Image (cartoon, rainbow, N blue to C red):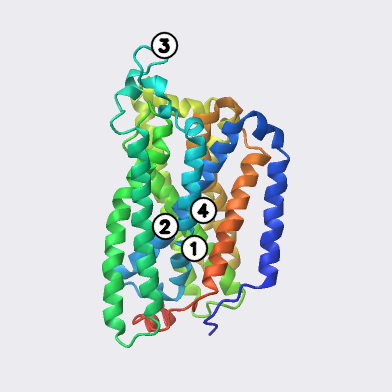
Amino acid sequence: MHNNFIYHHNTKKKLLILLSIGAIAILCHKKTIALHIEHLWTHLWISHVYFMGIALIGVFFFALQYATQAGWAVGIQRIPETFGYWLWVGGITGLLIFIGGHHSIFHWTHDYLYDVQDIRYDPIIAGKKSYLNLPFFTCRTIIYSILWIGLFVKMRQLSIQADFVKDRIKMYRKIKKYAIIFIICFAITSSTVAWDWILSIDTHWFSTLFGWYVFASWLVAGLSMITFCVTLLKEKGYLTIVNTNHLHDLGKYLFAFSIFWAYLWFSQFLLIYYANIPEETIYFIERMKVSPYRFLFFSNIIINFLFPFLALMKQNAKKYTAFLKIVSCVLLIGHWLDFYLMISPSLLKETGAINTLSLGIPIIYFVAFLHLFFKQLAKKPIIPIQHPLLQESKYYHN
């Protein structure tokens, strides 16, 4: 059993090639950046929100296994666990993006909206000033980051220490305690951060399902990244502890939560469509009627629901690394598209068509995420050798 991952030169070379593609794509649109800086801030914010969600779901998945005393995933727990290192990077870069582009991203940050003497005064936005104001928004974002990073760091430290202690049960219970705290914090902040980072962009629009919807999209994207990394490492000879039963369970997660995402997508759409209230329907009109988004809007449900539903319906389809890798890659792209449709139409309107800039930025984020993941994964044993449920994972059969 390979217990240590080696970050090979070939892997670094492939990531460098992918990074070059992303950089070239951005440079091809240097005029767009110079003339329309809001495009740059918009696409940076989309990628920031998307990859922060993947990192959070990684830590959430890791915490969930301890909170529920699940043994099947012990052999792969270091994969989602290592995703948490992106919270540091995302926290810093997200703050910088907000400082530089908050006026381009969040309409409510303009002072004139709250001045009754100004012709641009907006009574609806002014009525939300107690919640949507820069000091309170910034404080909330910092508190989110401190909670997430602090709990992740503590769980990660304990997880590594657990490989060298004699009292494995005591350490397991200690990690479980912090895991439960993280899950409670994440249950609250996953909704509030969705309101802050995405819903507040459409300041006049609201949806009671939005927090759940964002969580569902993050969840499928995070599970797709976990599945992608597990299958990749399995094919390279690592994670020999992983068998077809583990792969089958990961496939079932992708299958089930793609349906869950589709349920929330349809529920949100149907309630707004049926009520036909103008201030609610405008959200979908911008996405269904404006030409840059019309095709993507309907492609979203095909890529993120119909494709995984049909592809993963058969039991055997969920047991092969090559097949799961393809499905997880498609879903990673599909849920980036979902976040693109949540954010871009509200900010860029009819000018927000997908181009090399909008593709280059997420490619660079993807490379940076994987580089940090591989670098940190190589520093510690890839299998938690002292975990009390390791044997259950090793001989797991569903």
Tell which tag, 2 or 4, sits nearer the viewer.
2
Residue designated by label 3: 119
Could you tell me how far apart the alpha carbons at marks 2 and 1 are, in whole angstroms? 9 Å
* Amino acid type at image mark 1: Ile
The quarter of the picture where residue 238 lies is: bottom right
Q: Nearer the viewer, residue 208 or 83?
A: 83
* Amino acid type at image mark 3: Ile
Q: Which mark is residue 226?
A: 1
* Amino acid type at image mark 2: Ile
Q: Check if mark 2's residue and mark 1's residue have beta carbons within 8 Å.
A: yes
Residue designated by label 2: 57
Q: In the drawing, does residue 70 fall left or right of residue 248? A: left
Q: Is residue 131 above or below residue 112?
A: below
Residue designated by label 4: 308
Q: What is the quadrant of the C terminus in the image?
A: bottom left
Could you tell me how far apart the alpha carbons at marks 3 and 2 are, in whole angstroms? 44 Å
Tell which tag, 1 or 4, sits nearer the viewer.
1
Q: Earlier in the sequence, mark 2 or mark 1?
A: 2
Image coordinates for residue 119, horizontal then vertical, percent:
41, 11
* Secondary-structure class at tag 3: loop
Q: Nearer the viewer, residue 94 or 82?
A: 94
Image coordinates for residue 53, horizontal then vertical, percent:
44, 52
* Secondary-structure class at tag 1: helix
